[in-house]
Image (cartoon, rainbow, N blue to C red):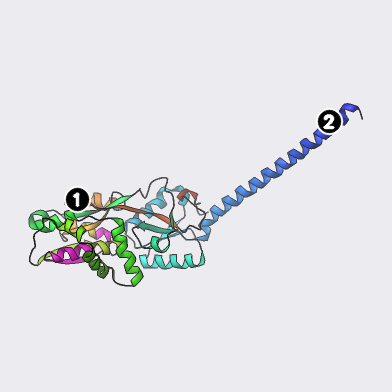
Amino acid sequence: MNFSLKKALPAIAITGAMFLVACSGNDANDEQNDEATNETENVGEMVDYTITGIEPGAGISVTTEKALEEYENLAGWSVELSSTAAMMAELDKAMENEEPIIITGWNPHWMFAKYPDMKYLEDPQNIYGGEEGINTLARIGLEEDMPEAYKLIDQFEWNVEDMEDIMYEAQDTGEEVEDVAKRWVEENEDKVAAWTEGVEEVDGVEFELVSTPWDSERASSGVLKEVMEQKGFNVTVTPVDVAIVFESVANGDADATIAAWLPLTHKDFYEKHQDDMVDLGPNLMGTKIGLTVPAYMDIDSIEDLQPKN
């Protein structure tokens, strides 16, 4: 062996060792990437490619069905529609056992007080929209027929924390939401005074408020009913499916609603009837809807989900 080759051998050995280490490192990285990919892909299998939802016809239910159509990676997925209570029962069971679950979530709702680590999945296509408001809608002619009622509902305005306070207390104590709403009115005279400023008392005028059966709307309608009745109105609150809410106000069968989630959640219902109603604008800002998961699930976006094979 000549001298130059002897000198080169150590360098060749080192280079070869470095090459093997690099290959080994690449293999390890590939394995890690595969594991991460498989973990994401398995989320669909673990939840049986099913999103757990609430009542059929609810705004978030309609939007979720639209999301299944718009996101190509949700091909083969379905949304299980039943009731809010049933969805929460499934969530409680999953959280207790740290099992994967994907639900239709929204603020305001007491679920985020009970489970503060719940998180919304990112929605790159903006199907669910950003923060929204809840608008007050009145039947055409209400201002002329009942000017005091019109003025009061036009001045009604509060925030997410107000609504959630009522919902949380009802959940914690087991009391009816409407009973807690009455107590909230007694304890918040300053806010109520702003709603009733300039509103004259009436004597038993009948007023029908149409709403949805969700706790958030039970809270708002319960508060408004109590305030209006203190002014002499005889208020009936009728809980119905969201489609009927809009139809009732547009047809004049109901006087008003304070339960229209806009501009996106109830967009289809609003656009269908907007020419037959008076929109008084938001009575609450800061609502949000979307697909929601427990924090222990290693997933951040709707696009992380994989289609059903």
Q: Is residue 192 left or right of residue 176?
A: left
- Residue range highlighted in magenta: 222-244
Q: Is residue 235 magenta?
A: yes
Query: Which residue lies most toward the bottom here?
Result: 174
Image point (67%, 43%), residue name: 26
Q: Is residue 304 above or below residue 185?
A: above
**Do we see residue 282 in this rendering?**
yes
Q: Is residue 163 left or right of residue 145?
A: right
Residue 129 locus on image (x, y percent): 35, 48
Camera-nearest residue between 57 and 43: 43
Q: Is residue 183 above or below residue 275?
A: below
Residue 257 locus on image (x, y percent): 21, 58
Q: Is residue 250 magenta?
A: no
Q: Is residue 109 above or below residue 122?
A: below
**Do we see residue 83 in this rendering?**
no
Residue type of the residue flagged with mark 1: Asp
The image quarter containing residue 198 is bottom left
Residue 147 locus on image (x, y percent): 9, 56
Camera-nearest residue between 162 and 96: 162
> Where does label 1 land, which residue?
279
The image quarter containing residue 169 is bottom left
Going from N to C along the chain, the mark reached first, 1 or 2, is: 2
Dot 2: element: helix
Q: How many marks?
A: 2
Mark 1 neighbour class, 10 Å CA radius: few under 14, some 14 to 19, many 20 or more: some
Residue 231 locus on image (x, y percent): 12, 64
> Where does label 2 land, which residue?
8
